[in-house]
Amino acid sequence: MSSFQGTIDWSRVARTCIGFAYIRVAVGTTPDPTYGTNAAGARSEGLAVGAYQYFHPDEDASAQARLFISSSGYRPGDLAPVLDVEMSGGVSRAVVLAGIRTWLTSVEAGLGVRPMIYTNPSFWTTRVHSPALTRYPLWIANYTTAAKPDVPQDDWGGHGWTVWQYDPHGRIAGIGRSVDLDRAAA
């Protein structure tokens, strides 16, 4: 969920089969103005809540991590924090990798929980490809009619996926615009 979805009727969402919601904290160093309202609304309806940040490799990764830590309101029991990695921002692979590592280690140290990486197979394979990062859980965006997603890095170092985003144009009661649909691994 993000400002893109507009105003959300969380009580209607909670009456569907949806059990969790990931809500965007920021795009790079720009806060999402709907995060606080959406997180509070989802929590008040008993949904499991997680926070994510759309990563901008061309911005200061430490500043992005600090913003996430201070704005996410992470609580024990929340879903793992997520770094959304799907653009290079015109910088080199080395800069992208360094920024990802900085964000992941800073957020893990700051919140005391291991974050998750959100990406898609094509971007990860062509722009990141780092076996060392497969120690972090994977949220894979792979839109397919197949029974399982395409997972990069040798099935993410043998760990597989934790969350699979299988549809970018879902419809859910209480949300007026399309929304990403996801499955959690069993």
Image (tube, rainbow, N blue to C red):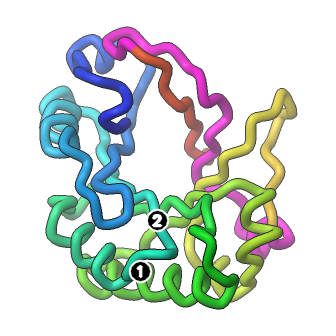
Pick the quarter of the image with the C terminus: top right
Asked which secondary structure carries label 1, the reply is helix
**Tag 2 residue:** 55
Q: Check if residue 29 falls in the magenta segment.
A: no
Question: Which image quarter: residue 102?
Answer: bottom left
Vertically, is 145 above or below 62?
above
Callout 2: few (<14), some (14-19), or many (20+) C-alpha neighbours within 10 Å?
A: many
Q: Which residue is mark 1?
A: 103
Please tell me whether mark 2 or mark 1 is closer to you in this view.
Answer: 2
Q: Mark 2 and 1 residues: CB-CB less than 8 Å, in contact?
A: yes
At horizontal 50% and vertical 66% (from top left) the residue drawn is 116
**Which residue appears at 82% of the width and 69% of the height?**
126
Residue 34 is situated, as x and y percent measured from the top left of the image, at: 20, 38
Residue 155 covered by magenta stretch: yes
**Could you tell whether 50 is left or right of 147 in the image?**
left
Q: Residue at x 29, y 24 (%)?
A: 6
The quadrant of the image that shows the N terminus is top left
